[in-house]
Image (spheres, rainbow, N blue to C red):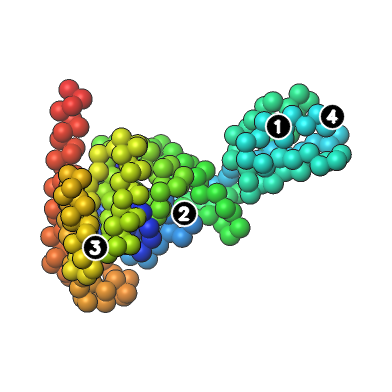
Amino acid sequence: MKIAIASGKGGTGKTTLSTNLASYIAENRECILVDLDVEEPNSGLFIKAELLHEEDMFKKIPEWNESTCELCGNCQTVCSFNAVMKMGKMIMVFPEMCHGCFACSELCPTGSLPMKSKKMGELKSYKSGNLNFIESRLIIGEEQAVPLIKQTLDYVDANFSEDRITILDSPPGTSCPVIEATRDADLVILITEPTPFGLHDLKLAVETVRQMGKPFGVVINRNGIGNDGVEQYCREESLDIIALIPNDRLIAETYSAGNLLYPTVPSVKNAVSHIESYIEKINEKMKRDTV
């Protein structure tokens, strides 16, 4: 079962929840934590594990072969991302804009745009007890997160069985990287905070997961600050509030020291326990629905 932890904006506690929930679950069974916030992964700050595997990750981009090109301009016409342009007697390729769709290469009548591998990031796999931790990181200057997120999820699918609980620490926001990170999730947990900004971004996130047809619930972090707008919105929209994590100085101090919260903060342990129970309830429902 795959559970994506997502939020409409950064800084709401997504990584805090992901690392603590995964570590808590791993106390009793195998669990996989995947940091898909590839532009700035930080789950590794809280997970102390042994590095088992690392590899470079590549994407395919076209490379212009001037000697065979007839300058028909078809490559520019079929590229939906303006990554290939005909300029005078040259074909310019802009790797940062290329989505690796192969259209220009496959539809070139003279085969003058063969696809070449280009490094876009790195993947590392760690293990500590029952917890497997995978993180990917884009290299500096690489702008597209989606291809690396997709390859990271492919790596997880190829190396771990589906019967394990997999926690996906998703990128913030509601754009393409989030869609890719949550596309195959069985459950999305939206974490927010009880402020007008949190409510605004929660509404965007709710609209997104509804469009995707995903079951989802809400966790309110820093409960006690702001107002009751988020809870009122959840009631009006009949959204499950799975857990409340209080605004607590001890949480801030423990987090700042780079430590997991649930071993020392009872309210956080109670929250992740409730979330685990909610996950089990959804999992049982999924099993019944497939019978």
Within 10 Å of the Cα at label 1, are there few (<14), some (14-19), or many (20+) other Cα atoms? some
Q: Earlier in the sequence, mark 3 or mark 2?
A: 2
C-alpha separation, residue under disc 1 versus residue under disc 4: 15 Å
Residue 231 or residue 174, whichever sits in front? 231
Q: Amino acid at mark 1?
A: Thr
Would residue 42 be found to the left or right of residue 93 on screen?
left
Q: Earlier in the sequence, mark 4 or mark 2?
A: 2
Q: Are marks 4 and 2 in contact (CB under 8 Å)?
A: no
Where, by quadrant of the figure, is residue 50 drawn? Answer: bottom left
Q: Is residue 195 above or below residue 67?
A: below
Residue 45 or residue 88, whichever sits in front? 88
Mark 2 = which residue? Answer: 38
Mark 3 = which residue? Answer: 194
Where, by quadrant of the figure, is residue 224 drawn? Answer: bottom left
Mark 1 = which residue? Answer: 77
Which label belongs to residue 70?
4
